[in-house]
Structure formats: structure tokens, C-alpha cells
Image (cartoon, helix red, strand yellow):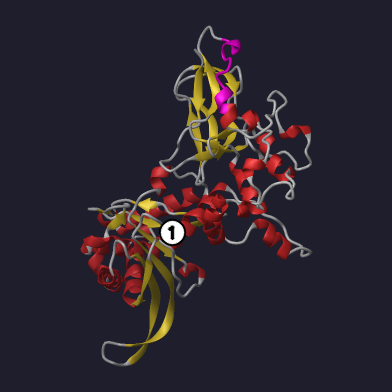
């Protein structure tokens, strides 16, 4: 019997992905472990390997198709003695669940390409109780245009509403969603997301601009951070940290490490200082887990890395146990592979605490948004020369770095957050203690 090859879940949170490229074609023989395709998640492009051996009988989802749901059928594998004739209706459910890229990308002019010729369009959209089947893109366009999906006839497979159906719908003939009870319930969410696309386009009508479509990473960043800012009760703690002792100590260490071609950055010390502080204030080394918190024994610290079009937060696990030189080497490796989008999911998921350093960009201070389920994130500004009062009471000049600790109040209260930030400050202002 032909074997269905399903869209894999390449990370615990993956719900859909883009089938970027097929590395096999129909008729090719594959063995277990052979790389068959490249799949884009919201974070990375990953290789998809065959689990069984056989012959590729049919490729159901063409390369370049976006929004392929996890567990959708993407291809069919044939065993010895089987032929394409044996496939039969194996792929029919997948066709109903996932429209082709060509159908979804059909122009709004109502061309014949809007629906596959082999699938007759029903007189009304498929409706399971109160549920109307439509592609995510069609739903988004309908919401922007204020259209009721229940009144639109779907031309996609099995009556699924696709992009062209929504774009061709006449506003005067379709009841506005604002008139529907469900639309009124969804209004707060729409308001939170900002004005509708049509409204924004009308505002800037006549002004030259270029529309930039959002890739999976940018969509995920927008969704997660909007949710985080709205649902996580942030509060902020700020401190100035004197870096003079650290800069002097770093210079001495780097001279001694020249023969090993190791050069420590200030960021390496910040990672170590935060990891040790989480050990000194263990109640703060925790995450929010819905109806409970999880408190960790080791310090897994995430560090934000800017890449083109977004960012990654690779996690340095057991950072409290590693030397400065080991942290430095690991961070350089993770950052380099993050910029190439070559990180595996386990390398950027997890951690209880994050660091976002914009000091290298000349930013004095800022407030960072917590990345759930983390309980805190440290926003690091630039170290700048400022007048300070010395231990002897004399006015002098020192290198001062401003930091802001964003804290989830569900996990960490004010006093606990203050203790954590004090421990970070103590470690950075007394760097030799981090080697003890």
C-alpha cells in the first residue's frame, strides 16, 4: 500500500511551514536517511530526510508552497511492485486541506487559474456546523475588507475559500463582518493588531511606497511580541554599572589568551555575570508555565542575535558552569550559524533568561520585551564615559553602562528582581569573582 509522506513538525511549536525545495522528483528511489526536501520554518531552513525506502510515486505539494500544515500529505512513497495507479484517492484529503500555491496566488481578475479544473466548485462554501473552510490568507484578506466568509462561494478544492474568491467578492453583495456577532467578538483583537490594511492604504493613497511582504520569521516575531506585551505583566528595573574594573581585567585576560587566539568581549562577561546571578538568586531562575512556575537548577541564558529580517535567541545551556573562553567560543559559533539560519530548534528554544545588547549600536538604554515563557530579559546599553563620584568622594570620570531588567511580575516580584539585578551588577563590577 502506498505510504503517505507527511509535513513534519521540525520544532515543538511548528504548526505550518514552507516547502522550499524538493531534492527528489517523481520516479526517484530513496532510502532511509536520504534528504528529500528543504523546509522553511519561521526560524530556519531545515533538511527533511526519508524514513522509509521506496520510490517517489507522487509529489502532492509543489516546492515554493507556503502555509503547509503539519501532518498534511506532501508526497506519496511506493513500495516494490506498486505503481502510480495504486495511489488512487490517497492524496484527496491533503488536497482538501491544503490548496496549491498556484490556486492561492491566483490574480484577482477572476481567471480560470483561480480553481483547479478537476475540482468542481460547489454552490456554497464547505461548512461544518458554524465553521467555514478558508485558507489563512483568504481569512486575513476578508478581515481586512470587512467581508463575511459564510457568504462567499469557495472555488478551491472541496469548496475551500481561497485568495481569489475573497478578492473578487463584491462588498455591496456580501454582509460586512461588523454586522455579525462573531465579528463583534473579534473586534478587540483586530483593534489590538492595528488598523486594517485597506484603511492604511487609503491613508497613504497618492504617496509613492513599496509593499514589502512578511516572511514567516517576521510574522512570528510580530505575533509573539504583540502577545507578550499584551499578556505578560512587565515591570522594569534600571541600574548603572561601572565597567572600569571589567575593562581593565578583560584587557589583561585577552593579552594572556592571545596565544590561544581567544578574544573575550564585554558581552561574554555579561553572559557569565547573568548566569552566576541566576545561581545566586535561584528563585528568579524560573519560567511561567500557565498554572505554575518551573524553577531550574542550571542557568540557560538566551542571547538575542540580529539577523537580516529578524532575530534569533540562541541559548547557552549550563552557562554558569562554563569558562569565559568556552562561552565566547560557543556564542561566536551560535551567532554565525544564526545569521545563516542554520540553527537547529533545540539551539534557540528554552532558557529562563535573555540578554539583548544594543550597546554596540550606540544605544544608551532601552526596554526589552520579554520572550515567553522567560521571566526576565536584560537590556544592555553602551558603556560611555560619565562623571562619577569615587569611593573617596572625589568627582572623577568612569565608564558607565546602563541596563534595564524587564521582569514578568507573575514569576518575579519587585524585591526579587532587585536582588537579581544587584547580583548581576556585583559580578560585572567585580569580574575576578566570576573566575572563583
* Viewer-closest of 234 and 433: 234
Residue at 63% in and 43% down: 149
Q: Relative to residue 319, is residue 67 drawn left or right?
A: right
Specify the segment rendered in magenta. 83-94
* Viewer-closest of 288 and 109: 109
Residue at 48% in and 25% down: 50
Counting from the top left corner in percent of width and height, residue 93 is at 55, 25
Considering every residue shown, the one lying at the far bottom of the view is: 394
Q: Quadrant of residue 156?
A: top right
Q: Relative to residue 258, is residue 93 drawn left or right?
A: right
Residue 59 position (above or below residue 391): above
* Viewer-closest of 357 and 326: 357
Residue 232 position (above or below residue 14): below
Residue 74: in magenta span: no
Q: Quadrant of residue 116?
A: top right
* Viewer-closest of 154 and 275: 154
Q: Which residue is mark 1?
A: 228
- Considering the image in quadrants, where does the C terminus appear? bottom left
Residue 12 position (above or below residue 33): below
**Is any atom of residue 391 visible in this view?**
yes
Q: Secondary structure at mark 1?
A: helix
Question: How many residues crowd mark 1 within 10 Å: few (<14), some (14–19), many (20+)?
Answer: some
Counting from the top left corner in percent of width and height, residue 153 is at 68, 37
Q: Relative to residue 268, is residue 103 drawn left or right?
A: right
Residue 221 position (above or below residue 359): above
Amino acid at each position: 500500500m502506498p505510504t503517505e509522506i507527511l509535513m513534519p513538525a521540525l520544532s515543538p511549536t511548528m504548526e505550518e511551514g514552507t516547502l522550499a525545495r524538493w531534492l527528489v522528483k517523481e520516479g526517484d528511489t530513496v532510502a532511509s536517511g536520504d534528504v528529500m526536501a528543504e523546509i522553511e520554518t519561521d526560524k530556519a531552513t531545515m533538511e527533511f530526510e526519508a524514513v522509509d525506502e521506496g520510490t517517489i510515486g507522487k509529489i502532492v505539494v509543489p516546492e515554493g508552497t507556503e502555509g503547509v500544515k503539519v501532518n498534511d500529505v506532501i508526497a506519496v512513497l511506493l513500495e516494490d511492485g506498486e505503481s502510480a495507479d495504486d495511489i488512487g484517492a490517497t492524496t484527496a484529503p491533503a488536497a482538501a486541506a491544503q490548496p496549491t500555491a498556484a490556486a492561492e496566488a491566483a490574480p484577482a481578475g477572476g481567471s480560470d487559474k483561480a480553481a483547479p479544473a478537476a475540482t468542481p466548485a460547489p454552490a456554497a462554501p464547505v461548512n461544518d456546523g458554524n465553521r467555514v473552510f478558508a485558507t489563512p490568507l483568504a481569512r486575513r484578506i476578508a478581515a481586512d475588507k470587512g467581508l463575511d466568509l459564510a457568504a462567499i462561494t469557495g472555488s478551491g478544492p472541496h469548496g475551500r475559500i481561497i485568495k481569489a474568491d475573497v478578492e473578487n467578492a463584491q462588498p455591496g453583495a456580501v454582509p460586512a463582518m461588523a454586522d455579525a456577532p462573531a465579528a463583534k467578538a473579534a473586534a478587540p483583537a483586530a483593534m489590538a493588531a492595528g488598523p486594517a490594511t485597506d484603511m492604511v492604504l487609503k491613508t497613504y493613497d497618492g504617496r509613492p511606497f513599496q509593499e514589502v511582504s512578511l516572511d514567516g520569521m517576521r510574522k512570528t516575531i510580530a505575533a509573539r511580541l504583540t502577545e507578550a506585551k499584551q499578556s505578560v505583566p512587565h515591570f522594569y528595573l534600571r541600574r548603572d554599572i561601572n565597567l572600569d574594573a571589567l575593562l581593565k581585567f578583560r584587557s589583561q585576560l585577552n593579552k594572556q589568551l592571545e596565544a590561544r587566539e581567544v578574544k573575550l568581549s564585554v558581552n561574554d562577561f555579561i553572559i557569565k555575570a547573568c548566569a552566576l546571578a541566576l545561581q545566586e538568586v535561584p528563585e528568579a531562575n524560573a519560567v511561567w508555565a500557565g498554572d505554575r512556575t518551573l524553577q531550574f537548577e542550571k542557568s540557560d541564558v538566551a542571547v538575542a542575535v540580529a539577523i537580516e529580517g529578524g532575530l534569533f535567541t540562541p541559548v547557552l545551556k549550563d552557562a554558569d558552569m562554563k569558562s569565559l573562553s568556552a562561552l565566547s567560543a560557543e556564542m561566536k559559533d551560535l551567532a554565525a550559524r544564526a545569521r545563516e539560519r542554520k540553527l537547529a530548534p533545540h539551539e534557540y528554544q528554552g532558557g529562563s533568561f535573555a540578554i539583548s545588547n544594543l550597546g554596540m549600536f550606540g544605544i544608551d538604554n532601552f526596554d526589552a520585551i520579554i520572550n515567553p515563557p522567560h521571566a526576565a530579559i536584560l537590556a544592555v546599553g553602551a558603556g560611555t564615559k560619565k562623571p562619577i563620584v569615587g569611593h573617596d568622594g572625589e568627582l572623577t570620570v568612569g565608564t558607565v553602562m546602563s541596563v534595564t531588567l524587564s521582569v514578568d511580575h507573575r514569576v518575579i516580584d519587585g524585591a526579587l528582581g532587585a536582588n537579581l539585578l544587584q547580583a548581576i551588577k556585583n559580578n560585572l563590577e567585580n569580574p575576578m569573582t566570576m573566575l572563583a
